């Protein structure tokens, strides 16, 4: 079983060492709307720092809403040289009817945009994801990036109470 960090006998317990053992999390205290844009950008709240040469497990829950004609592109961005992937379960883009509610579970590479449906401006769609990240020589940021799939004057929204969780393994 992997354990992080390894603490040999006699190690001085410092605040930094103790903090490195704790998982990180980020949550959206309020919704962020984006209208008339297809340029994917990091969410202002859903970002966490990652160290170089480290292994992580992460999860996220995204509540999204917007005009069904716009949908949403979502991407998990990581530092250059990082490896791994994640899986998202959510409504496929284009499946905008409230009935039949088609869902998918898809393995996705980092830094790749994936389209998800925003079936309504009044009711948020939930998307849950989980994966593993191994960073290379570069430290940086794990972030949830997003924009509208099709530019629309009605805002697509990353709703409050969306969250991101990160646990270092090694």
Image: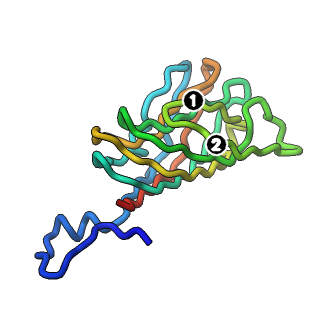
Category of crowding for the residue at label 2, using alpha-carbon neighbours closer than 10 angstroms: few (below 14), some (14–19), many (at least 20): some
Tell which of 99 and 22 is nearer to you.
22
Q: Quadrant of the N terminus?
A: bottom left
Where does label 2 land, which residue? 107
Q: Quadrant of the C terminus?
A: bottom left
Question: Residue 133: x percent and y percent?
Answer: 45, 48
The quarter holding residue 80 reads top left
Question: In the image, what residue occupies the spot 62% across and 52% down?
Answer: 128
Residue depicted at x 68% and y 45%: 125
Residue at mark 1: 113
**Which residue is most to the bottom?**
9
> Would residue 123 be seen by someone viewing this image from the given angle?
no
**Can you give x and y, in whole percent of width and height, for residue 58 in the image?**
48, 54
In the rendered image, the vertical position of residue 57 relative to residue 45, given as above or below: below
Q: Nearer the viewer, residue 26 or 69?
A: 26
Q: Secondary structure at mark 1?
A: loop
Q: Is residue 168 above or below residue 141?
A: below
Q: Is residue 48 visible?
A: yes
> 35 or 9, which is in the foreground?
9
Percent position of residue 75, x then y: 53, 34
Q: What SS does tag 2 mark?
A: strand
């Amino acid at each position: 079983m992997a354990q992080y960090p390894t603490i040999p006998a006699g190690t001085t317990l410092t605040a930094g060492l103790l903090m490195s053992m704790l998982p990180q999390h980020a949550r959206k205290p309020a919704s962020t709307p984006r209208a008339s844009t297809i340029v994917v950008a990091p969410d202002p709240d859903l970002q966490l720092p990652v160290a170089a040469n480290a292994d992580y497990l992460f999860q996220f829950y995204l509540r999204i809403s917007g005009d069904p004609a716009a949908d949403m592109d979502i991407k998990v961005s990581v530092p250059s040289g990082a490896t791994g992937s994640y899986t998202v379960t959510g409504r496929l883009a284009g499946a905008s009817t409230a009935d039949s509610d088609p869902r998918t579970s898809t393995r996705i590479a980092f830094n790749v945009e994936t389209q998800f449906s925003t079936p309504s401006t009044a009711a948020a769609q939930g998307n849950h994801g989980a994966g593993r990240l191994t960073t290379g020589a570069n430290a940086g940021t794990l972030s949830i990036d997003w924009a509208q799939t099709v530019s629309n004057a009605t805002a697509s929204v990353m709703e409050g109470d969306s969250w991101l969780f990160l646990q270092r393994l090694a």
